[in-house]
Image: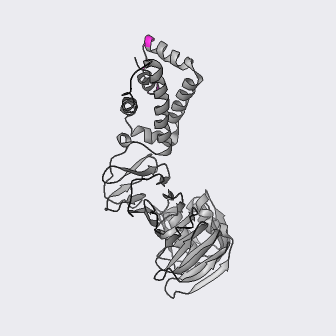
Amino acid sequence: MEIIDLIIKKLHHHVLSKEEEQFFDAWIQESEKNSGFYIELEQLKNKKEVVAALATVNTELAWKNVIRKYEKETKRNQKQIFINRFLRYAAVFVGALFLGYAVDAYLLPKNTTVLPTNEITLQSDNGDVQVLSSDNIYGIKDINGKILGAKSASRLDFRGIKYVDKLIYNTLTVPYGKKFEVTLSDGTLVHLNSGSTFRFPIKFLNGHKRQVHIIGEGFFEVTKDKKHPFVVETSQMNVTVLGTKFNVSAYPEDAFISTVLEEGSVSISAINDIHKEVLRLVPGDQVNWGVKANAVNRKQVDTDIYTSWIDGRIVFKNQKFENIIKKLERHYNVKINNNYQALNKELFTATFDVETIEEVLNSFAESKTFKFKIKDKTITINKP
């Protein structure tokens, strides 16, 4: 009789025999470590955010594989050694499940290459595409089955990769209405806003700049590394840093590529001449780079307006409605058709977080009256 089998049965609410109950109770009462560990397992299984992940794993097979892997040692003092090994390695497995790391036996199968427009996807260097379901926790593997990183509820984590010795790029796509985060191999944290595409190497290499590319919007918390500058490429300009916090907005439909510096220092250069610095920013600076004219404008701003989306808020300060529409479309994953042209030039100041799109539009209509109707994901605005 093995305690691991009894734990599996208990977690899945299977009925234990009288003998099994006695054995299980004896193990629980043997130490606070045993009882505390089982409580943690129950809490893990009952956590709503990991229910979907647990559902994708053959729990019984997983536990037995963990134990089998480490039961090849000499079985001196068999019972106590088994229990000690169980606690040590099972704890590793549970911790892995929390963090999103799992050994090959527990990884989900590769997803189809069909690209759904409303799902977050990760495209590997060889073209394979994986849908990143927001509910599941699992590992990310390369074509050879080696683990590259971990997927948790709303973040990819590529720290700890050791075997990669060349630059291999992945492309992460975040649709309208969603946000996502990536921890790069150097520990840099990137928050990606709705409607963004982010290309990055799964591992930065010594002797190379830490270079990434973004279409859309991202907030970067860059790990300091004086020997390896961090470069964010957009369609028109580069942002180069050593370690800092800044926001880049480079949506293809916008007239400007915008950089807002919250902390530290960054330099701006043209995409075709990364070595020629155009501007160096100080905290609070915003630089708008004209996409068509290559005109550059710098001013001091309230950075919260441009970084509030990280916390789920959208902030507008004296912004034209025609520009507000674009942000609402991305945030709520809707299409807005404005037939009331006079409304486009109206200026609004407002902050929203948990409001629905209907509540947001009603709020604007209180300042400048207009009518709107919502059908599926399309909103039509008309004169009052």
Residue plotted at (54% across, 67% down): 227
Along the line of sight, the residue nearer the viewer: 174 or 330: 174
Quarter of the image containing the N terminus?
top left
Near-viewer residue (367 or 21): 21
Position above or below: 137 against 196: above
Picture coordinates of residue 233, whole percent (x, y): 48, 73
According to the image, what is the colour scheme of the structure? one colour
Instruction: Decide whether the magenta segment is chiefly helix, strand or loop.
Output: loop
Number of numbered markers: 0
* Whole-percent x, y for residue 22 in the image: 48, 12
Residue 329: x, y in percent?
A: 51, 67
- Residue 226 falls inside the magenta stretch: no
Residue 146 drawn at (x, y percent): 35, 50
Classify 78 as above or below 339: above
Residue shown at the point (50%, 64%) measured from the top left: 194
| Magenta stretch, residue numbers | 10-19
Q: Quadrant of residue 263 in the image? A: bottom right
Asked if residue 155 is positioned above or below residue 78 in the image, the reply reads below
Is 45 situated above or below 361?
above
- Residue 362 lies in quadrant: bottom right
